[in-house]
Image (tube, grey):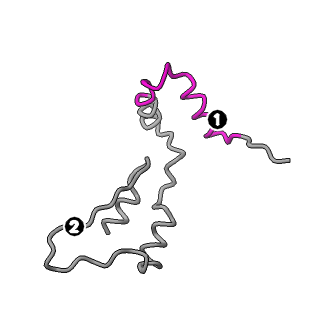
Amino acid sequence: MSTDQPTDARARLLSHFTSAQGSAEHGSKWNELWTEGFLPWDKGFPNPALADLLSQRQDLLPPPSSPQQSKQKKALVPGCGKGYDVLLLSA
């Protein structure tokens, strides 16, 4: 029988946000975690699926813009962390 036991990091996150007085406090609660340096969601490297896509599966990406086009392509990088995916895309 499988049970979903929270990890220490998950338990700490649950406890941290349980003390909030409604969702209006969530912003400050996230800031507290960043200030404390408690960032269990930040793995320290780009998403492996994105890195694989860019290095191995460029056939899935739209073709490059022509040199005559001055418009740069855009990408949305959702999530939280230190921006490793953004750095990978800009390289």
Which residue is at the front of the view, 1 or 63? 63
Q: Are marks 2 and 1 in contact (CB under 8 Å)?
A: no
Location of residue 3 by image quarter: top right
The amino acid sitting under disc 1 is: Ala
Q: Residue at x 30, y 65 (%)?
A: 90
Q: Quadrant of residue 15?
A: top right
Q: Is residue 24 left or right of residue 40?
A: left
At horizontal 38% and vertical 54% (from top left) the residue drawn is 83
Residue 20 is one of the magenta-drawn residues: yes
Q: Is residue 77 above or below residue 27?
A: below
The residue shown at (50%, 43%) is 39
Lower sequence index among marks 2 and 1: 1
Quarter residue 24 falls in: top left
Quickly name the residue at label 1: 11
Q: Which mark is residue 31?
A: none
Q: Which mark is residue 72?
A: 2
Secondary structure under the numbered disc 2 in the rendered image: loop
- Left or right: residue 8 versus residue 32 is right
User: Where's residue 38, x and y in %?
Assistant: 51, 39
Q: Is residue 20 left or right of residue 1?
A: left
**For this rendering, which residue is in front, 38 or 53?**
53
* Picture quarter with the C terminus: bottom left
Secondary element under disc 1, as helix, strand or loop, is: helix
Judge whether 85 appears above or below 51 on screen.
above
Residue 88: say if magenta: no
Most frequent secondary structure within the magenta stretch: helix
Residue 35 on image: x %, y %: 42, 35
Q: Which residues are magenta?
A: 6-28
Label 2: few (<14), some (14–19) or many (≥20) C-alpha neighbours in 10 Å = few
Position of residue 2 relative to residue 50, above or below, is above
Comparing labels 2 and 1, the label whose residue is closer to the camera: 2
How dense is the environment of label 1, judged by Cα within 10 Å: few (below 14), some, or many (20 and up)?
few
